[in-house]
Image (cartoon, helix red, strand yellow):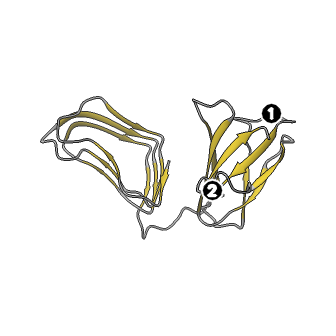
Amino acid sequence: MAYDAGPFLVGGGRPSRGIRVLDNYLYHVPMQIGYSAPYNEDCQVRGNVIVGAGLSINKFKQVVNEDNLVLGKEAPWPKRPAQVIVRPNRYDAGRAHVIALNWARQPTVEVLPTALLRPGDRYRLLDPRNVYGQPVAAGTFEGKPIRIAAPGEFAVWVLLKGD
């Protein structure tokens, strides 16, 4: 995931092959696949969500571009409930990242962290820009969604298991 940053670039000055760009969440970050190489062989761009920016795929002979949601800066948001993704960290068994696409711009979103937590587990939900500050939320997971104040149409948190 990336947000409020420069472009998400994949490619370079030399030809590429076997490029796979899968399941990314970008907010106000354009995605560009292929850069200055005169030609590239193949790429797969699947399952990405890009909000407030665009997607460009350049100079590839074969392209698989499927199941991507791209909403440019002026595009209307879908009329549906918030989409909250809990993605466990593959390198730290006690950590996950939480992404909220608050499509309806509600004041709160519900996070169901069962991808990381079991009932009875202690947790802390942190602002990634201030991971050493006070938690956004903390407590004991009771098996029900955790209601969190949504700062806007997009939010990201770090979920930690334990105290």
Residue 104 circle label = none
Question: Quadrant of the rendered structure where residue 119 is?
Answer: top right
Q: Position of residue 96 (x, y in %)?
A: 64, 40
Up/down of 21 relative to 55, above or below: above
Query: Does 56 sit left or right of 158 as displayed?
Result: left
Query: Does 52 sit left or right of 39 as displayed?
Result: right
Counting residues from the start of the chain, the first of labels 1 and 2 encountered is 1
Question: Which amino acid type is shown beneath numbered disc 2?
Answer: Asn
Q: Is mark 2 on a helix, strand or loop?
A: loop
Category of crowding for the residue at label 1, using alpha-carbon neighbours closer than 10 angstroms: few (below 14), some (14–19), many (at least 20): some
Q: Nearer the viewer, residue 133 or 138?
A: 133
Q: Which residue lies at the image location 43% right of the left edge and 58% below the top edge?
A: 5
User: Which quarter of the image is occupied by the C terminus?
Assistant: top right
Q: Which residue lies at the image location 78% right of the left edge and 43% below the top edge?
A: 123
Question: Which amino acid type is shown beneath numbered disc 1?
Answer: Arg
**Cα–Cα gap, marks 1 and 2:** 26 Å
Q: Which of marks 1 and 2 is in front?
A: 2
Most extreme residue toward the front is: 132
Query: Does 151 sit left or right of 70 as displayed?
Result: right
Question: Quadrant of the rendered structure where residue 52 is?
Answer: bottom left
Q: Is mark 1 on a helix, strand or loop?
A: loop
Q: Nearer the viewer, residue 62 or 92?
A: 92
Residue 130 circle label = 2
Residue tagged by mark 1? 118
Q: Which residue lies at the image location 25% right of the left edge and 33% below the top edge?
A: 42
Query: Does 24 sit left or right of 19 as displayed?
Result: right
